[in-house]
C-alpha cells in the first residue's frame, strides 16, 4: 500500500494493529451482547405466567 507519509507503516495507515486487537474486541463484545440478550429472553419467558 503506497502512502503519502513515508514514515507510516501499512498497519498505521489503515489504523490497524498487528495483533488483531480490533477483531478480538468486536468478536468478544458481539458474543457478550448475544449472551446478554439470550439471558434476558430466558428470564423473561421463565417469569411469564401460563397464559391461555
Image (cartoon, rainbow, N blue to C red):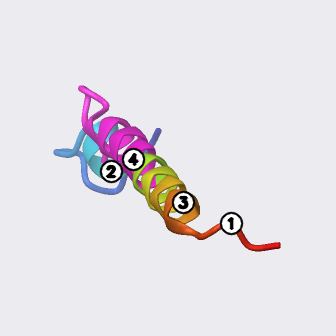
Type of secondary structure dominating the magenta stretch: helix
* Residue at image location 26% in from the left, 28% down from the top: 18
Q: Which residue is mark 4?
A: 26
Q: Which residue is mark 2?
A: 13
Q: Relative to 41, is 24 above or below?
A: above
Camera-side mark, 4 or 3 = 3
Camera-side mark, 3 or 1 = 1
Decide whether residue 20 is among the magenta residues: yes
Q: CA distance from mark 4 to mark 1?
A: 38 Å
Task: Assign the C terminus to one quadrant of the image.
Answer: bottom right
- Label located before the other in sequence (4 or 3): 4
Q: Position of residue 20 (x, y in %)?
A: 31, 31
Q: Which residue is mark 1?
A: 50
Decide whether residue 27 is among the magenta residues: yes
- Label located before the other in sequence (2 or 4): 2
Q: Which residue is mark 3?
A: 41
In the picture, measured across the screen, residue 18 lies left or right of residue 1, that is left
Circle 1 crowding by C-alpha within 10 Å: few under 14, some 14–19, many from 20: few
Q: Position of residue 15 (x, y in %)?
A: 30, 51
- Label located before the other in sequence (4 or 1): 4
Q: Position of residue 3 (x, y in %)?
A: 38, 50
Q: CA distance from mark 1 to mark 2?
A: 58 Å
Which residue sits furthest top? Answer: 19
Which residue sits furthest right? Answer: 52
- Label located before the other in sequence (1 or 2): 2
Q: Secondary structure at mark 3?
A: helix
From which residue to which does the magenta span run? 16-33
Amino acid at each position: 500500500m503506497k502512502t503519502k507519509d513515508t514514515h507510516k507503516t501499512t498497519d498505521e495507515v489503515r489504523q490497524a494493529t498487528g495483533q488483531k486487537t480490533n477483531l478480538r474486541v468486536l468478536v468478544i463484545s458481539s458474543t457478550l451482547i448475544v449472551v446478554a440478550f439470550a439471558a434476558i429472553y430466558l428470564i423473561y419467558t421463565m417469569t411469564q405466567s401460563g397464559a391461555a
